Image (cartoon, rainbow, N blue to C red):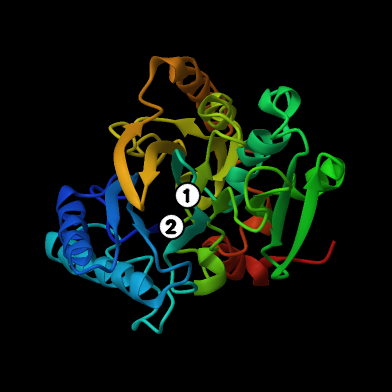
């Protein structure tokens, strides 16, 4: 049996500012998805938030890019936007960049990560949700999960992982992709994904072994809002799906990379570098300087397309040290104020409001 696990998210209004999703919006989404489940459009669902992003986690048997499922998500976001406007929430509907649904939600503003796979006897799936950052923020942790033997012991001692994985890399500026094998092409892979503002990991596939090699074991959303809107309207706030155990990295190996609060781009006005901080759902509200950037991890067991409970995986004192380290890094970066490397380099500020400042000053520049 094949199951599709879909995460579709959008910022349709924050309260206050860009801090958090209002409970009324979550209620709207839950009611709409409950109705859709009763009507057989989806099998199961879970609604939550990371910061000001409304996150729809759905299971179904309709495959990726299904018009009915995408249309459902679009209608949820449209209705939630109307509620956000009634409540006067900030940035109501800011991620809905088109007026009408046209069969697929891609390119319309919301972020999407979808994965169709054949269920194993036991199927642990982790949904990672980020706020105040960009798709490339997943490059380092996804690489470490599936290619770093210092993170994932199974790459060394589990025969089912020993042959490695295949990474699908997207060039999000040239709109091209390349498939690269690890460990044999590891150095070439790192040469690309180290440039996280351009090359991003889209999917990971098993190379050989117990799982079908054409079914992904990890998927990351890669939508760039500035490429759709032509200007800065909010950071991309990516999501990812990762399967675990039984021929794949163990749950602890999947979570371990997030014990290092690595620097990511985004934070205030999408224009600053800062640490990604793993937090519980309760802590998934962005406050200090509209941040620092957050990531939550929700774990499920999937059986016959149904979600068996959920676990808030970063709600654990084992990550307290990481959170403390993240705040030390945040403090250090903040002391730079408007100077790089806290502020992004100029080439990454192209779609912010900085060009308007340059336009105002252009007549005052003189030849030297």
Q: Is residue 163 above or below residue 365?
A: above
For image coordinates 21% across by 64% down, the residue present is: 80
- Quadrant of residue 247 in the image? top right
Question: In the picture, residue 59 is in which quadrant?
Answer: bottom left
Find out whether the residues at labels 1 and 2 contact each other: C-beta distance under 8 Å: yes
Say which of 28 and 241 sits in front.
Answer: 241
Quarter of the C terminus within the rendering: bottom right
Residue 279: image location, x then y, percent:
40, 30
The residue sitting at 18% across, 59% down in the picture is: 34
Numbered disc 1: secondary structure:
loop
| Left-right relation of 238 to 79 | right
Above or below for 22 versus 173: above
Q: Where the N terminus falls, by quadrant?
A: bottom left
Disc on res. 192: none
Front-lying residue, 101 or 131: 101
Of the pair 240 and 125, the residue shown nearer to us: 125
**Residue 225 is at least partly visible in this image:** yes
Q: Which mark is residue 119?
A: 1
Label 1 neighbour load within 10 Å: few <14, some 14-19, many 20+: some
Left or right placement of residue 317 versus residue 272 in this view? left
Residue drawn 56% across and 34% down?
Answer: 246
Q: Position of residue 11 (x, y in %)?
A: 35, 58
Q: Is residue 132 left or right of residue 220?
A: left
Q: Is residue 178 above or below residue 103?
A: above
Describe the element under mark 2 as helix, strand or loop: strand
Q: Label 2 neighbourhood size at 10 Å, few (<14), some (14-19), many (20+)?
A: many
Q: CA distance from mark 1 to mark 2?
A: 7 Å
Q: Of the numbered discs in the image, which one, if any, rests on residue 3?
A: 2
Q: Residue at x 50, y 57 (%)?
A: 115
């Amino acid at each position: 049996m094949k199951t599709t696990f879909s995460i579709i998210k959008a910022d349709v209004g924050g309260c206050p500012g860009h801090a958090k999703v209002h409970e009324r919006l979550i209620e709207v989404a839950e009611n709409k998805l409950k109705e859709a489940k009763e009507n057989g459009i989806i099998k199961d669902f879970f609604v939550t938030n990371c910061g000001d992003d409304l996150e729809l986690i759905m299971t179904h048997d309709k495959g990726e890019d299904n018009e009915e499922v995408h249309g459902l998500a679009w209608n949820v976001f449209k209705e939630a936007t109307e509620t956000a406007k009634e409540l006067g929430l900030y940035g109501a509907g800011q991620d809905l960049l088109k007026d009408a649904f046209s069969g697929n939600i891609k390119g319309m503003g919301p972020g999407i990560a979808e994965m169709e796979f054949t269920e194993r006897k036991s199927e642990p799936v982790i949904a990672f949700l980020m706020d105040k950052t960009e798709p490339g923020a997943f490059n380092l942790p996804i690489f470490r999960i599936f290619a770093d033997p210092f993170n994932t012991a199974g790459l060394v001692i589990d025969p089912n992982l020993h042959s490695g994985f295949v990474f699908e890399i997207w060039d999000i500026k040239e709109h091209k992709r390349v498939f690269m094998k690890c460990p044999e092409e590891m150095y070439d892979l790192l040469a690309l994904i180290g440039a996280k503002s351009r090359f991003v990991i889209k999917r990971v596939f098993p190379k050989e072994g117990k799982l079908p090699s054409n079914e992904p074991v990890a998927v990351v959303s890669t939508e760039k809002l500035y490429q759709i809107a032509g200007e800065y309207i909010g950071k991309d706030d990516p999501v990812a799906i990762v399967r675990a155990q039984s021929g794949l990295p163990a749950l602890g190996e999947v979570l371990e990379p997030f014990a290092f609060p690595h620097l990511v781009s985004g934070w205030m006005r999408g224009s600053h570098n800062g640490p990604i901080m793993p937090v519980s759902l309760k802590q998934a509200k962005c406050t200090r300087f509209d941040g620092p950037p957050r990531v939550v991890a929700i774990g499920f067991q999937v059986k016959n397309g149904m979600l068996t409970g959920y676990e808030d995986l970063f709600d654990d004192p084992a990550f307290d040290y990481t959170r403390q380290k993240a705040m030390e890094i945040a403090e250090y970066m903040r002391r730079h104020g408007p100077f790089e490397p806290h502020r992004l380099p100029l080439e990454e500020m192209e779609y912010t409001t900085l060009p308007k400042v340059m336009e105002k000053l252009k007549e005052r520049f003189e030849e030297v």
